[in-house]
Structure formats: structure tokens, C-alpha cells
Amino acid sequence: MGIDGLDGQLIELLTNEPRIGVLECSRRLGVARGTVQARLDRLRERGVIRGFGPQVDPAALGYPVTAFATLEIKQGQGPDVRAHLATVPEVLEMHTTTGQGDMLCRIVARSNADLQRVIDRVVVFEGIVRAATAIAMENPVTYRVLPLVRQAADTSGG
Amino acid sequence: MGIDGLDGQLIELLTNEPRIGVLECSRRLGVARGTVQARLDRLRERGVIRGFGPQVDPAALGYPVTAFATLEIKQGQGPDVRAHLATVPEVLEMHTTTGQGDMLCRIVARSNADLQRVIDRVVVFEGIVRAATAIAMENPVTYRVLPLVRQAADTSGG
DNA sequence: AGAATCACTGAACAAGCTGTACAGCGGGAG
DNA sequence: CTCCCGCTGTACAGCTTGTTCAGTGATTCT
């Protein structure tokens, strides 16, 4: 398990310039094309790289407001609540957590007013005891994995 | 602003099968290749599609533990704290928020024990008054945008 | 109504990439 | 010492890409 330096460079390269293709990768990294191809296949097999799907920006889609909702769930209602949340398009992800709440979910909305509608839709469900919402204002660190990839590559490589 | 049905179908298709290419997309959607190409270009121009970079799974990289930390910041220390958090590879994203805390960040770690190390590294910073961490256990709704895309397409289309 | 603008279509072309296969070489493990 | 695995360099056919063009239909402006 883990990745080595070449894997790391490959991921970094593809992250920065996703359109370049295998051949160009091999040229940039100074290795044979077959190597790049084999590395990519293995990374995908091992699940390190999940895919190359389009990264959609909810804001550009008309949902510029992001919020995080902490939900407290009634005993035994977990599964129902999950199923409920899964039906709400504006719920982008959901985790069950330790600590104060029982669930944490990421929500987007068209506006602050619209956020109220979404939250209503989320919490109007019997299994949910309480909900605390935090609206995201700035996003100084956008979702990133590259630093982690570098660290994983360094750690592995020795 | 917004997307229409064809845009939505295109995003959905590319999300499910990212490797198929423009020509195959045009065949599947029953439109001309030029149309697909033009749509993709526009979607990228408008920022709806940010890119096609590899989606890396931190768990497969050796970081299977995810946690969310709510940080309370000392007045005026915001910028310093942001810069600090940006230097920690295990901090995958960070938002400033309204409500209880001042910041919410997503953290990964190699294990629960390792999480302690990471959190220590995060909170050992003068500007941070208090930190509350919630460890993510299950992830019933993985990050997804497709339902939102469909809704946006429907809304736009009429 | 007439004209202009825009998007989509279908076609064409050269250029380049992909998938795949093969033999050779070197290092690490048993 | 030998086996296994991964990297290299090469080769080939097939296909895709980027680009351009003219034609058509719908929508909008005059």
C-alpha cells in the first residue's frame, strides 16, 4: 500500500494538466510510455485514483452558498435519515460522526434564502432531533490532495 | 448562467465513464461531435467544469481516517491561522464559517493515533483558542454532484 | 417582414495518440 | 544461482483529436 515518487509525480502532473495524455506524461517524467500506462493502471486498480470524472463547481451551477449542518438523530433512526438525506440533491455529502452531533452534512443552496428552504427540507424529518447549521463564508483552503500525495510519496520512497 | 439538459447529460455521461472521449460522447448523446466539443469548451469556460484531474482517494493513500475540526480563532488571527493550516498536508480543506466555531476543516490521518498527532500539529498554534474534533465514521453519502446537476438542468430547461 | 446572430449538423483533413505486443535488461527475493 | 517483476524501446494498426467549412433552422433585432 502507498505510492512511490513516480506515482506522486504522475498524479501531480495529471492534476495540474489533466489533458496531456499518457505519451506526454512519459515525456515529461522521462520514463517509457508503457511505464506510465502501467502505473496508471495500477493506481486505478488499487483505488488510489478513483477516476477522471469532471469536477463540477456547484457555484457555477447556480449554488454559490455552502453550509455545514450538524444533525442530531433520534435513536435507531439513522438509516432512515440517511435515506432521506440521499434524496436531497443539495446534500452533497454526509458523514456520521463522533462528538456533539451524530451526522455532518455539506449542503449547497442558491442563496441564503434558498438555504432556509433546503434546510427545512432536510430537517423536516421525524428522525432528526436537532440541527445546527454553519454557513461557509470564505474557503481559504479549497479541497486539495496534492500535499498529501507528496507526503505519501516521500514516506513510501524512504 | 446554468446548464441545459444536454449539458447535464454530458456531465453525467462523463462522470460515469470518464474515459470515453468526445467522439463517443457524441455517439451516445446522438449529437454531432462539434456540439459536444463546443458544449465542453463552454462548460469549462464558464467554470461549471473545473477540470478532469484524477480523483485521489486519501484512504487508498494510507489515510483512512477522516475528521472534521471546528476551530475557534483569536480575534485578528484569522489570516495567520489560515496560512498555518495551509502548511499541513493532512488538512484537505478549510472554510470560515458562521456559528459556533470560526473555522471548519477536514482532516485525514493514518489512524486514530495519528489523528492525534495531526490535530496537535494543527492546534499548536497561538491563534487557535479552542478546537472540537468530530471523527467521521461512516460516509453514507459520498461527495456527489450529479443530483444537483440534474436539478440544475431541469430547472434551466423549463 | 427581412436580416442578422447563434447553435447544431455533417463532412473533411492531417496529425497525433492509444492499445497492444514483443524482446531485452536489471534488481530483488528465494 | 535462478526466478520474477518492472522498466525500456520499438513496432503496428486503428482510432480520436483539433480544426475548418458550408448549410440549416430558430431566435432576435431592425
Image (cartoon, coloured by chain):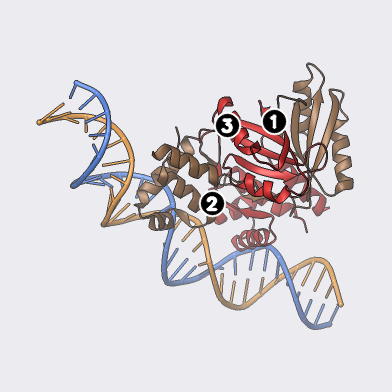
Chain colours: A red, B brown, C orange, D blue
Kind of residue indicated by mark 3 = Arg
User: Foreground residue, D5 or B76?
Assistant: B76
Extreme residue toward the top, this view: B76
Residue A24 placed where, x, y %?
Answer: 56, 52
Q: Chain of mark 1?
A: A
Relative height, residue A16 to residue C21 (above, below):
above
Q: Badge 1: few (under 14), some or many (20 or more) residues near its Cα, within 10 Å?
A: some
Q: Is residue A10 above or below residue A42?
A: above
- Given residues D2 and A127, the one toward you in this image is A127
Q: CA distance from mark 3 to mark 1?
A: 13 Å
The residues tagged by marks 2 and 3 sit, at their Cα atoms, a distance apart of 28 Å
Q: Residue at x 59, y 34 (%)?
A: A118
Residue B154 in view (yes/no): yes
Asked if residue B148 lies left or right of residue A2, the reply is left
The circle on residue A114 is none
State yes or no: discs 2 and 3 in contact (Cβ < 8 Å): no
Residue receiving disc 3: A117
* Mark whose residue sits in front, 3 or 1: 3
Q: Which of pointers 1 and 2 indicates the residue nearer the eye? A: 1
Sequence-earlier tag: 3 or 1: 3
Residue at image point 62% right, 32% down: A66
Query: In the rendered view, does B153 fall on the left or right side of D27?
Result: right
The label on residue A133 is 1
SS under mark 2 = helix
SS label for mark 3: helix
Reading the image, the residue beneath label 2 is B15
Q: Residue at x 44, y 38 (%)?
A: B155
Q: Chain of mark 2?
A: B
Name the one closer to the observer, A46 or A11.
A46
